[in-house]
Amino acid sequence: MTAAELRARLTPRGHRPLDPAGHRQAAVLVGLEVGRGVLLTRRAAGLAQHAGQVAFPGGKIEAGETAAAAALREAFEEVGLAGADVEVLGRMDDYVTGTGFHVAPVVGLLRAGVELVPAADEVAAVFYLPFEVLLDASAAVRRRATFKGVTREFWVWPHEAYFIWGATAEILVGLARRLRGEA
């Protein structure tokens, strides 16, 4: 996809915010780079929460901070992505996780060829989900698993090296639908 196509399909666009009481407020950067795809990370194995999982760069929204500011700050801390290298296009619908987070996905267009340096204590790997995979309507599949006696269904995205599921996969499904003009 070209930068013009991404801008046309993602801006200006409102989002449906949620206001779940008692959830921890967080923001993630859904970074899109022309020619590469969607920026993702594999979280470091030693982290207290979601260790080893695939995620967007992101984290807690600090007091007085907007979702966009938090997403950009966290992306800089996690992968060295400077705010000047991101054109914020808007927001996607907020998402509430089963682990108690209220996530605000902020969509940004990354400068082509931007060099990223993962913070070793937070990020084990940086990679991209190609647009070809994202735009393939049959790529994401629903899976079912039982954990602690509860059966849940969730999305999984194909990738040769990483298991993409959970909140990250759900946000990717929403992004794919918007980019295909379905939402």
Image (cartoon, helix red, strand yellow):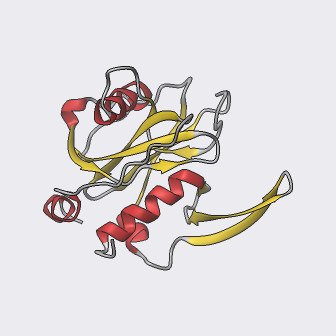
* Residue found at x 34% / y 53%: 92
Relative horizontal placement of residue 45, taking residue 79 as reference (left or right): right
| Residue 118 at x, y percent in the picture | 45, 30
Relative horizontal placement of residue 88, taking residue 104 as reference (left or right): left
Residue 144, compared with residue 71, is above or below; it is below
| Residue 19 at x, y percent in the picture | 45, 43
Quarter of the image where one finds residue 61: top left
> Closer to the camera, 43 or 170?
170
Q: In the displayed image of the protein, which residue is found farthest to the right? A: 149
Relative horizontal placement of residue 169, taking residue 106 as reference (left or right): right
Q: Which quadrant does the C terminus fall into?
A: bottom left
Residue 31, compared with residue 161, is above or below; it is above
Quarter of the image where one finds residue 52: top right
* Residue found at x 24% / y 66%: 1
* Residue found at x 21% / y 65%: 9
Residue 111 in view, yes or no: no
Q: In the displayed image of the protein, which residue is found farthest to the top? A: 63
| Residue 87 at x, y percent in the picture | 19, 43
Relative horizontal placement of residue 92, taking residue 46 as reference (left or right): left
| Residue 14 at x, y percent in the picture | 24, 55
Residue 19 in view, yes or no: yes
